[in-house]
Image (cartoon, rainbow, N blue to C red):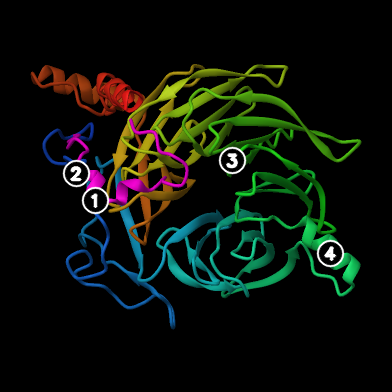
Amino acid sequence: MDFYPKGSLHSLMDMENMEHQPQIHLSVRTHNDLSKHDVQLTSPRSSTSDSTVFPTMMTSPGAESPWTRSPHPTSSPPPPSLLYYCIASLHRQDGNIYAIAASKGLVFTGSDSNRIRVWKQPDCMDRGYLKASSGEVRSILAYSDMIFSTHKDHKIRIWNFMVSDTFKSKKVATLPRKSSFLLFSRASTAQQHKDSVSCMAYYHSEGLLYTGSHDRAVKAWRVSDRKCVDSFVAHEDNVNSLMVNQDDGCLFSCSSDGSVKIWRRVYTEDSHTLTMTLKFQPSPVNTMALSTSFNHCFLYSGSSDGMINFWKKERLCYRFNHGGFLQGHRFAVLCLATVGNLIFSGSEDTTIRVWRREEGSCYHECLSVLEGHRGPVRCLAACLEMEKVVMGFLVYSSSLDQTFKVWRVKIFPDENLCMECTDHRDAGKRITEYDMSPVLSPSWVEKKIRDTYSQ
């Protein structure tokens, strides 16, 4: 695996460097048919907008919209045995998509324009947009009927929206808020981040919005009165992701300095104190995700070496113990999302992997590899979808190939899988790769790490 230096997370897009990477082919088969649904994992290709990539582009979703919709690959419904299926694909003609958020049946996408696009779940029909005075939306966070967004001017904007026959929204605040008085204006400038605001987290019960920035600082904003109640230097490098445990208010931050830190709020002083530092590798940590339930809490972190480390919280205390790591991605893990005991990871290797944690243990298996993007998968969002007995999941992904895709992922009950495998064995066939967890060889990973350190 490659360790990326600071500032070169997306170096795989450099085709000159890609020529030196080994060509690896990974065959992924569904549990129902070993011969029909083979998928090949190949070297990433740079995206273009010509007819070779999008042969029959349809009309833009909205007036003066830079988005175009790709047609479905087939008009017939997908076979029932298929584990995943891309149900919609949108292409943005200019600029990248930096952020995705989902709430109340809507999906929000932020790009380098000054508009946050609003799409209807799950087929992503255009519902409108939110327009800010400053462009380059760096991150989006959705909670209930509120949207938080960060922009090129290093400020945070808060929006309210209403879902009806038509989408209606209103900007209610800008953080830090402006003041006409010179004294207060200087204080407002001091509260503002000095660099790009890369991530946010919202503590629901206390109404606290946390923002992390490339200026290495984390700030806590009280949404009710728009005040910055705390600000502290959290890391030695860019703060890349923030998470809040809604059960106990713990704040998690990760950084390009290779560390994950856990902070607790001191309620009497509105300040935060560092309680634990988790550092298992020297590689930059790009993203985090939490998986919580009544009796457990798992923290996942994705780093530039392609690893996904996870920690399990001890009961009755705030300590997290390292439980292991998930390996399979060839390049940096850029985004993570969790729903229940499923973990979705997006990577520079252009793929999305679906992992499942076994109930009551730390064992994980890779269920499937989603392919379709032609560039690094930059951000993900996922939500649950119920379909009679079979659970379905909607996964929203955006990539540096300037596309936004919607996937329907189906997870079949374990007993069905066992019956399928028994049938294959009786027929004298090899056990499906679905059950073998399609991840890369550990010996190949170790060789990549040795080669990296020997340079």
Q: Amino acid at mark 4?
A: Arg
Q: Specify the quadrant that holds the N terminus.
A: top left
Q: CA distance from mark 4 to mark 1?
A: 47 Å
Residue 432 in sight: yes
Residue 7 shown left or right of residue 229 in the figure: left
Q: Nearer the viewer, residue 13 or 107?
A: 13
Q: Quadrant of residue 411?
A: top left
Q: Specify the quadrant that holds the C terminus.
A: top left
Q: Quadrant of residue 346?
A: top left
Q: Dot 3 corresponds to which residue?
A: 237
Which SS type dominates the magenta stretch? Answer: loop
Question: Which circle's residue, 2 or 4, is located before the other in the chain?
Answer: 2
Q: Secondary structure at mark 3?
A: loop
Q: CA distance from mark 3 to mark 1?
A: 28 Å
- For disc 1, the neighbor class at 10 Å (few under 14, some 14 to 19, many from 20) is some
Question: Which circle's residue, 3 or 2, is located before the other in the chain?
Answer: 2
Q: Position of residue 385 (x, y in %)?
A: 46, 46
Q: Dot 2 corresponds to which residue?
A: 19
Q: Quadrant of residue 262?
A: top right
Q: Dot 4 corresponds to which residue?
A: 186
Q: CA distance from mark 3 to mark 2?
A: 30 Å
- For disc 3, the neighbor class at 10 Å (few under 14, some 14 to 19, many from 20) is many
| Residue interval drawn in magenta | 1-26
Residue 183: image tag: none
- For disc 4, the neighbor class at 10 Å (few under 14, some 14 to 19, many from 20) is few
- Mark 2–mark 1 contact, CB under 8 Å? yes
Q: CA distance from mark 3 to mark 4?
A: 26 Å
Q: CA distance from mark 2 to mark 4?
A: 52 Å
Q: CA distance from mark 2 to mark 1?
A: 6 Å
